Each structure stands twice: as structure tokens, then as C-alpha cells.
């Protein structure tokens, strides 16, 4: 999908009501439906916790078998992976609740899945570090090309390729804000990793 193919997103309606963590959703019959703010996958992402029904609506933040894409975007969060990991930390409870994600299937075991997602993210960051060490003049592209992607990097095109590159940049930014220093060629100055 081209950038022009995404321009319709600019036409999306704004929210009629903005809610924050701990707010109750004003929905008749759902008096225990509360908001948990979970930025990371996208800015403004929320999950909904229904204590009465013991259900957790996880949206795109926690999926049962795949990891949500976390991308560094021009107008988005300046450190989306850190935001995602901090959001996951907020969900380390309600293990007996049924989880209703935006994709795939419902499941139980929120705490275990949260721990798995955090481990996967940190393993990917370690994979990025190994590529930074191995490559003489690394760029976002050369790092992404050497990472392990479920479909293989060579098969990615259009939107999937853009997401892979943006996700790699998110890991680089997370490493930079965590204190890791390294030169990255072709990375915007705002997220350049500088060798100390």
C-alpha cells in the first residue's frame, strides 16, 4: 500500500469522548467497564477491563500468538517501544479474566502472555544490538534485513516492509533512550545513536 493509499486515514473522525486510565466507560449495563491506557502499538490506544464480567478487552495491545507491531513514526510517540513495555507492565494482573483481543481469538492467561510479549520485545532489541556490533556502517535497512522476520525480510513489500523498518527504528530508539550508543547511518537525527 502506498502513502497515497493511507491518506484516507486523515479523514477519520475525532473522538466524541476522551477517557483516561481508571475512567469508567459510560455504557448502560457496563458499570464496571474501566479504561487502561496502553500506548505503544499506537498513541492513544486503550484496553477495557470489565471486572463484573471478568473480561479484558485488549485491542491490539495483547494478542494471543503474534506480537503487535510497534513502530517509530514521524508524528507518533518518540519512544513507542518503551511506552509499549510500560503499558504491558500495567497489565500484570487479572490472570483469570478472559482476554478479548482485536485479532485472532479469545484466551486466558493475561499475565503469562504479557510476560511473553515483553520477552519477545527484549529479545528483538538484543538481536538489533548484535547487528549493530556485527555491521560496519549499519542503517535501519541493513539491520532490518538481517533480523528474523516470520515471513523473511525478502518477502516483505509495501506496508509490511514499511512496518518492519519502522519497528526496527523503534528498537533503535529504545536502545538509544536506554543508554546504548552506536552510530546509525540514515537514521533521522532525533533517533541517531551516537557512539560514546
Image (cartoon, rainbow, N blue to C red):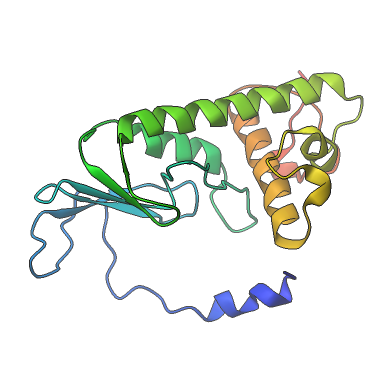
For the point 60% across and 33% down, the residue is 174
| Snapshot quadrant of residue 81 | top right
Instruction: Check the picture and name the quadrant holding the N terminus.
Output: bottom right
Tell whether 56 sits left or right of 41.
left
Tell whether 166 sits left or right of 64.
right
Tally the numbered discs: 0
Instruction: Check the picture and name the quadrant holding the C terminus.
Output: top right
Q: Nearer the viewer, residue 196 or 39?
A: 39
Instruction: Residue 138: give x, y in percent of width and height.
Output: 86, 32
Tell whether 18 sits left or right of 159.
left
For the point 30% across and 34% down, the residue is 109
For the point 70% across and 55% down, the residue is 160
Q: Nearer the viewer, residue 107 or 78?
A: 107
Q: Nearer the viewer, residue 99 or 80?
A: 99
Instruction: Residue 170: give x, y in percent of width and height.
Output: 63, 41
Instruction: Residue 75: give x, y in percent of width and height.
Output: 59, 59
For the point 14% across and 68% down, the residue is 27
Instruction: Residue 151: give x, y in percent of width and height.
Output: 72, 45
| Snapshot quadrant of residue 124 | top right
| Snapshot quadrant of residue 148 | top right
Amino acid at each position: 500500500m502506498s502513502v497515497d493509499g493511507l491518506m484516507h486515514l486523515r479523514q477519520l473522525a475525532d473522538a466524541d469522548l476522551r477517557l483516561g486510565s481508571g475512567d469508567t466507560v459510560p455504557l448502560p449495563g457496563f458499570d464496571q467497564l474501566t479504561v487502561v491506557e496502553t500506548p505503544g502499538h499506537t498513541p492513544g490506544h486503550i484496553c477495557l477491563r470489565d471486572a463484573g464480567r471478568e473480561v479484558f478487552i485488549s485491542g491490539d495491545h495483547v494478542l494471543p500468538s503474534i506480537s503487535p507491531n510497534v513502530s517509530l513514526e514521524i508524528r507518533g510517540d518518540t519512544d513507542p517501544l518503551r511506552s509499549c513495555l510500560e503499558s504491558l507492565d500495567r497489565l500484570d494482573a487479572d490472570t483469570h479474566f478472559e482476554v478479548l483481543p482485536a485479532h485472532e481469538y479469545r484466551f486466558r492467561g493475561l499475565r503469562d502472555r504479557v510476560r511473553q510479549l515483553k520477552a519477545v520485545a527484549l529479545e528483538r532489541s538484543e538481536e538489533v544490538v548484535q547487528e549493530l556490533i556485527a555491521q560496519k556502517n549499519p542503517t535501519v535497512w541493513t539491520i532490518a534485513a538481517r533480523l528474523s522476520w516470520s515471513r523473511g525480510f525478502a518477502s516483505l513489500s509495501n506496508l509490511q516492509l514499511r512496518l518492519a523498518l519502522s519497528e526496527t527504528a523503534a528498537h533503535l530508539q529504545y536502545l538509544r533512550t536506554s543508554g546504548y550508543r552506536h552510530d546509525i547511518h540514515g537514521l533521522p537525527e532525533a533517533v541517531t545513536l551516537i557512539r560514546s
